Image: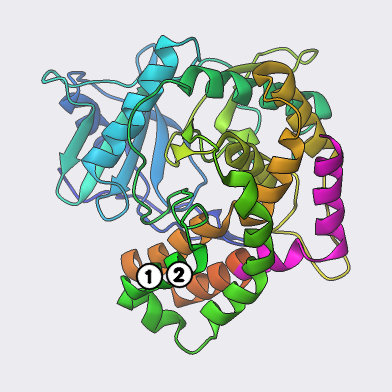
């Protein structure tokens, strides 16, 4: 196979509000055709859309009347085993009534095509309308009704996942996890995480990152500690935001038609997964300035209510979500720092991930706007 990315690289969403060059070469038609050939389909193909997400390369590929979603990862980010874990979880959900795009398999039964440093996965096109596909990360739901529907769909996913037995995935680059915040001593676990990653430690050495992390996270960890005792972990989506949902093709109804992108799925807590969903959609992290804080409190409460209606988690669930919310991005932010220091050499983005996404999120929840959102969720009971 030729080197990926033979044509001009399009701009994609970055870590801020500006479009940037992608981290990885885009998929081109000849590459897509060779990948599909590995799955047993030959012939010319046409690329109808490329994903604007920067940390992998993905495209919709048309082959005759059939459409496929082809995604390429570097093995340093996702191994074949990682992708198989995602595919197995998606397959379990499909068997339990959650609509997800079918994972394609090669003649030998494998769902991952490996070529050199690249790992490819192919899915059938998901049903429904991709209303949010061009919205940047952390964009809000268009309507409270969409947020309610998304919450209900997440509740249905959690019910379907309740008996899924696979062990949790280890925290690595671009991974959601609760391994640190659910550790007996979370701050000691954070120190150990850095100690095992000398490249990350060297990159952030000039900044007192760990000391500031301890100062900001300690009060939230102390509040969460008694609440998480006795909670059971179950598998969740890990990246529940509007653009990872497909929608029924009707302007009059907010109905989730399918769930996509299980790249951050893991065994966590239901309240953690709901907190991630709110963190991803209710707070405009990218547009935040000292004079401008945008919080979709109505959307956050609508999502929580939709979840409660479907999953019936019991009294006090809003309090639990509020306790997880300030901490739910902590481990993903660490995994971003690892990605920008150990996988690709991007010191500027590593600093951004550390200062704005790790520490900045924690700081914001100590400010009035963040505290008010936590109070609103807590009051929802």
Q: Position of residue 136 (x, y in %)?
A: 64, 47
Q: Position of residue 15 (x, y in %)?
A: 58, 61
Question: Which of the pair 268/63 is nearer the observer?
Answer: 268
Q: Is residue 381 left or right of residue 112?
A: right
Going by the picture, which residue comes out furthest to the left?
A: 108
Taking 112 as reference, is 2 above or below it?
below
Image point (32%, 71%), residue name: 197
Which quarter of the figure is the N terminus placed in?
A: top left
Q: Position of residue 103 (x, y in %)?
A: 33, 21
Q: Is residue 269 left or right of residue 77?
A: right
Question: Which of the pair 226/91 is nearer the observer?
Answer: 226
Taking 285 as reference, is 120 above or below it?
above
Image disc number at residue 188:
2
Q: Callout 2: few (<14), some (14-19), or many (20+) C-alpha neighbours within 10 Å? A: few
Secondary structure beneath dot 2 equals helix
- Residues drawn in magenta: 359-381
Going by the picture, which residue comes out furthest to the bottom?
A: 206
Q: Callout 1: few (<14), some (14-19), or many (20+) C-alpha neighbours within 10 Å? A: few
Question: Which of the pair 337/60 is nearer the observer?
Answer: 337
For label 1, the residue is 192
């Amino acid at each position: 196979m030729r080197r990926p990315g033979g044509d001009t690289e399009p701009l994609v969403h970055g870590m801020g509000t500006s479009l940037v060059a992608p981290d990885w070469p885009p998929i081109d038609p000849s590459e897509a055709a060779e990948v599909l050939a590995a799955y047993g389909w030959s012939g010319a193909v046409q690329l109808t859309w490329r994903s604007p997400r920067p940390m992998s390369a993905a495209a919709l590929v048309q082959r005759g009347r059939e459409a496929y979603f082809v995604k390429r990862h570097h093995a340093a980010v996702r191994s074949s085993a990682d992708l198989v874990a995602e595919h197995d979880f998606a397959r379990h959900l499909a068997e339990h009534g959650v609509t997800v795009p079918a994972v394609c398999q090669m003649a030998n039964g494998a769902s991952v095509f490996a070529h050199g440093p690249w790992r490819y996965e192919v899915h059938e096109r998901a049903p429904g309308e991709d209303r949010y596909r061009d919205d940047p990360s952390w964009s809000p739901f268009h309507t409270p009704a969409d947020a309610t529907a998304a919450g209900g769909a997440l509740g249905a996913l959690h019910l379907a996942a309740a008996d899924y037995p696979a062990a949790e995935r280890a925290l690595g680059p671009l991974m959601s996890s609760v391994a640190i915040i659910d550790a007996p001593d979370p701050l000691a676990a954070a120190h150990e995480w850095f100690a095992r990653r000398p490249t990350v430690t060297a990159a952030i050495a000039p900044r007192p990152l760990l000391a500031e992390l301890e100062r900001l996270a300690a009060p939230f960890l102390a509040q969460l500690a008694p609440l998480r005792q006795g909670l059971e972990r179950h598998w969740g989506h890990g990246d529940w935001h509007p653009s990872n949902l497909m929608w029924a093709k009707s302007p009059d109804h907010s109905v989730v038609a399918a769930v996509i992108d299980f790249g951050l799925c893991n065994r966590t807590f239901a309240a953690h997964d709901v907190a991630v969903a709110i963190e991803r959609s209710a707070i405009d992290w990218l547009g935040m300035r000292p004079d401008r804080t945008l919080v979709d409190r109505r959307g956050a409460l609508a999502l929580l209510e939709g979840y409660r209606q479907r999953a019936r988690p019991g009294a006090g669930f809003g309090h639990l979500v509020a306790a997880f919310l300030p901490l739910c991005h902590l481990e993903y932010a660490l995994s971003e720092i690892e990605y920008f220091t150990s996988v690709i050499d991007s010191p500027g983005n590593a600093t951004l991930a550390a200062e704005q996404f790790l520490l900045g999120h924690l700081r914001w929840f100590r400010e009035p706007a963040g505290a008010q959102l936590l109070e609103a969720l807590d009051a929802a009971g």
